[in-house]
Image: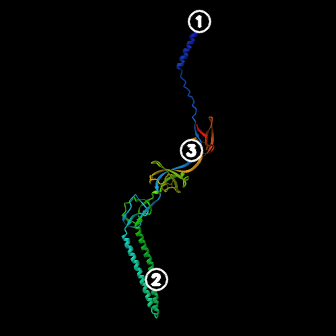
């Protein structure tokens, strides 16, 4: 009896083991639960440094001083002494106009003035002779006639003097025209002919001939929007760069900020926002010429020994700013701050932090 009990006990145990093994083979496997990684903390040091706020502008190089050349009067050109693109000095002869007609007019005027002068002297001499020859016993009628002739001579002399003044002024104008017929340069620089016309051989009065460009007056002319114009002031320092020459960095200065928007934007009456012209000085540089595209960074604000943090570490909450400060030993606390100047990547901290602190970004 005992043997049967042991036998069935062994059989049941074996069947139980076989069944458990079979269940283990068909039971779905439970996915492994991944280990939770510790959140990565990025830390930033709070530093003390010079911070600057800039306005970026883009424009072209232009010459600031240009002297226009106009024909002094109508005449034929006798000779050209300058070519397009030629460097000239003040006082150089640019061209000569025909002088023959002017000289003839001067000679004629001088002869007329001399003739009128002699006629006046003759009349004066004749009148004096008549006065000297008048007899003491002349009749009343003769004396009246003599007085009339004397008054007539006086009025005639005054009229002749007015005429002489007119003739002398006319003669002076002719001599002035003769001097201007040899046209000398009023300035030094690069001479450029009017590109809209051929080299003239016959000029009209006040005809535009060309211009003299002062190569030392190169400047950067840029346009800025209404959001930037109020922060730009005359005298501000500017770092100028030439995109085509990466190694070229120049120091300029704001010379002028327009008080009114460019007229073109107003005339077109489009939705384009208003643009204001800003003129920036440029130093003398052999590689600079007119018409180049230039970029400039205008320093609108500068502060030395400012406490700054990366802009990435500053967060906002309901209009206030704060950072997370690493207190050490794994302790991180929120710290409210007051901010000041801002650049593209940094923010000045006025209160709440000091240089040497560490802020974190979780």
Which quadrant does the C terminus fall into? top right
Q: Which residue is mark 3?
A: 346
What is the distance, in whole Å, between disc 3 and disc 2 at their CAs? 91 Å
* Residue depth check, mark 3 versus mark 1: number of the one nearer the observer: 3
Q: Which quadrant would the N terminus be assigned to in this image?
A: top right
Q: Tell which of 143 and 1 is nearer to you.
A: 143
Q: Which residue is mark 1?
A: 3
Where residue 171 sits in the image (x, y, percent)? Answer: 42, 74
Expressed as whole percent of the image width and height from the top left, the position of residue 240 reads: 49, 50
| Residue 161 relative to residue 259: left or right | left
Asked if disc 3 and disc 1 are in contact, CB closer than 8 Å, the reply is no
Mark 2 highlights which residue?
A: 155
Residue drawn at point x = 54 percent, y = 19 percent: 24
Residue 224 locus on image (x, y percent): 51, 52
Q: Residues within 10 Å of mark 3 (few under 14, many from 20)?
A: some
Upstream in sequence: badge 3 or badge 1: 1
- Secondary structure state at the residue bearing disc 2: helix
């Amino acid at each position: 009896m005992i043997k049967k009990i042991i036998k069935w006990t062994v059989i049941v145990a074996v069947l139980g083991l076989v069944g458990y093994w079979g269940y283990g083979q068909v039971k779905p496997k439970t996915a492994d639960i991944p280990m939770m990684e510790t959140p990565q903390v990025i830390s930033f040091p709070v530093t003390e440094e010079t911070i600057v706020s800039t306005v970026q502008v883009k424009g072209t190089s232009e010459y600031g001083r240009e002297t226009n050349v106009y024909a002094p009067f109508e005449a034929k050109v006798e000779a050209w002494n300058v070519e397009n693109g030629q460097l000239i000095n003040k006082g150089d002869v640019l061209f000569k106009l025909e002088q023959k007609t002017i000289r003839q007019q001067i000679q004629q005027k001088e002869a007329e003035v001399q003739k009128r002068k002699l006629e006046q002297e003759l009349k004066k001499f004749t009148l004096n002779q008549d006065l000297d020859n008048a007899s003491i016993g002349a009749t009343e009628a003769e004396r009246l006639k003599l007085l009339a002739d004397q008054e007539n001579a006086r009025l005639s002399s005054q009229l002749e003097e007015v005429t002489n003044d007119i003739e002398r002024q006319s003669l002076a104008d002719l001599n002035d025209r003769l001097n201007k017929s040899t046209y000398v340069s009023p300035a030094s620089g690069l001479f450029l002919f009017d590109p809209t016309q051929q080299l003239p051989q016959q000029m009209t009065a006040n005809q535009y001939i060309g211009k003299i460009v002062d190569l030392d007056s190169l400047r950067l002319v840029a346009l800025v929007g209404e959001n930037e114009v109020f922060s730009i002031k005359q005298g501000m320092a500017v770092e100028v760069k030439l995109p085509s020459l990466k190694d070229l960095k120049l120091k300029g200065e704001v010379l002028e900020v327009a008080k009114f928007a460019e007229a073109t934007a107003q005339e077109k009456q489009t939705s384009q926002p208003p643009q204001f012209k800003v003129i920036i000085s440029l130093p003398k540089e052999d590689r600079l010429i007119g018409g180049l595209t230039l970029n400039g960074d205008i320093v609108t604000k500068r502060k030395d020994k400012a406490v700054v943090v990366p802009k990435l570490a500053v967060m906002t909450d309901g209009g206030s700013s704060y950072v997370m400060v690493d207190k050490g030993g794994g302790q991180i606390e929120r710290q409210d701050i007051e901010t000041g100047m801002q650049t593209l990547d940094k923010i000045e901290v006025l209160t709440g932090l000091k240089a040497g602190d560490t802020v974190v970004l979780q």
